[in-house]
Amino acid sequence: MKSLAVLESRLPKDANRRDGLSVVVDRTGNIHDIGYDSDLDGKYTEQDFDHIVDATGQCVIPGLIDGHTHPVWAGDRVNEFSMKLAGATYMDIHKAGGGIYSTVTSTHLATEEQLYSSLVQRLQTMLQNGSTTIEAKSGYGLDLENELKILRVLHRAQKEGPWNLSITYCGAHAVPKGSSAEVAVKDIVEHHLNAVMEETKAGRLTVDNVDVFCETGVFTVEQAKAILRKGQSFGLNANFHAEELSYLGGAEMGAAIGSKAISHLEYISPEGIAAIAQSGTVATLLPTTAFQMRLPAPPVRRMIEQGVAVAIGSDFNPNAHCLSMPVVMYLAAVTFHMSLEEVLAASTINAAASLNLADSRGSLEIGKVADMVLIDSPSWEHLIYQLGNATKLISTVISKGFVVRARKKE
């Protein structure tokens, strides 16, 4: 930023105070100060602010963090949605050559420019719905050439856009057609990850995490472990799919190797819950996917009671087409039996922790990045309560200290 910025709010009010709260953002886009209006007005009397956002009567929350997405792909799978409504399971479609394989074929045929254009449109919609940080996976390439293509698209979006991406290599999203899991694992461990990291060192890619679909009929626990450990050897965070459609013991393995986060977990065992609670591994839960695939809800209450940090994500992909974290938050509250406070934490500070970003994002604290969402309602709970109304409720989105969305005053 070229100047400081101030956000002023008359709510919430301390019972013993007559004024509201303000946030000061510095030239680097970080939060410089937070306090009551009366205190900050006097403290910054001599300061000139180029940009003042009047949030009188509104609520200010941290920018939302979407902890799990697959945002780069071509085509769609609307026909498979109809098949699932008629009773076909995810693995039925996958084994018939649909699902991920269908999207892989379309993505191979798309150019980088086409993929970039569609990605930017999706990220803009996410931003309008309050998501300022988004975990973004590859995974619809499977072969090295196309995985690198997807990662280049994500790298470009990170450099050119107002959002913050946590980029994940997910070449082990499925076993490539005509191959086997054993061959795929060997290829990823001996070739893919080495090539990805060479491109990263050269500054042509940014990669933060490594992911594997650890599931019956895809990659076993030991195969997933080999890929994750290789990624960790390069400094990547292990952040992977496990226990979505069946129990394999992926959570126990992930905890043992120090995974930063594990996603889905509908079929996690009591031993798995204890293991991730002990290791500090974040459980990234995906209510949109569980809802539309009619899966049993993960044992969220048991996880929280045992001290597991729970994050949530949209799992945006052609199988679960949702770009709105407020919708995901609503589903988490209703279908996962989470309180509104738990849902907010899962969408901010816990999601930041799942991406190893809790020191810089996920809460409104001095020194952290100024990612904020202003909600034009008497309380922040309305963002969840008013299903499907987020873009009307959100008046302003601030990312990295810049106003990136400001609703026109009526």
Image (spheres, rainbow, N blue to C red):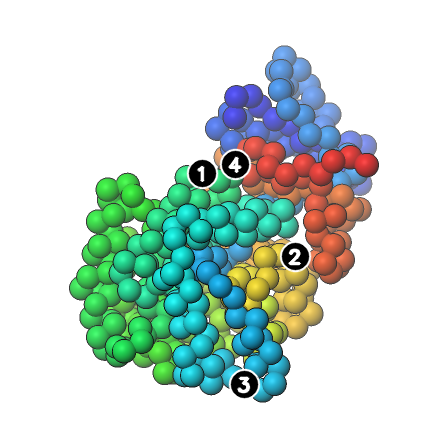
Residue type at numbered disc 3: Ala
* Foreground residue among 76 and 202: 76
| Image position, residue 29 (x, y; %) | 51, 31
| Image position, residue 395 (x, y; %) | 71, 41
- Quadrant in the picture for residue 333: bottom right
**In the rendered view of the protein, which quadrant contains the C terminus?**
top right
**Cα distance between the residues tagged 3 and 1:** 40 Å
Nearest-to-viewer mark from 2 and 3: 3
Q: Residue furthest left?
A: 190
Q: Is residue 91 left or right of residue 324?
A: left
Identify the residue under disc 1: 160
Nearest-to-viewer mark from 4 and 3: 3
- Quadrant in the picture for residue 181: bottom left
**Cα distance between the residues tagged 1 and 4:** 13 Å
Identify the residue under disc 2: 326
Nearest-to-viewer mark from 1 and 4: 1
Give the residue at x 21% y 67%.
187
Disc number for residue 88 = 3
Identify the residue under disc 4: 400
- Contact, CB < 8 Å: mark 2 with mark 3? no
Residue type at numbered disc 1: Glu
Mark 3: few/some/many CA within 10 Å (<14, 14-19, 20+): some
**Cα distance between the residues tagged 4 and 2:** 21 Å
**Cα distance between the residues tagged 2 and 3:** 29 Å
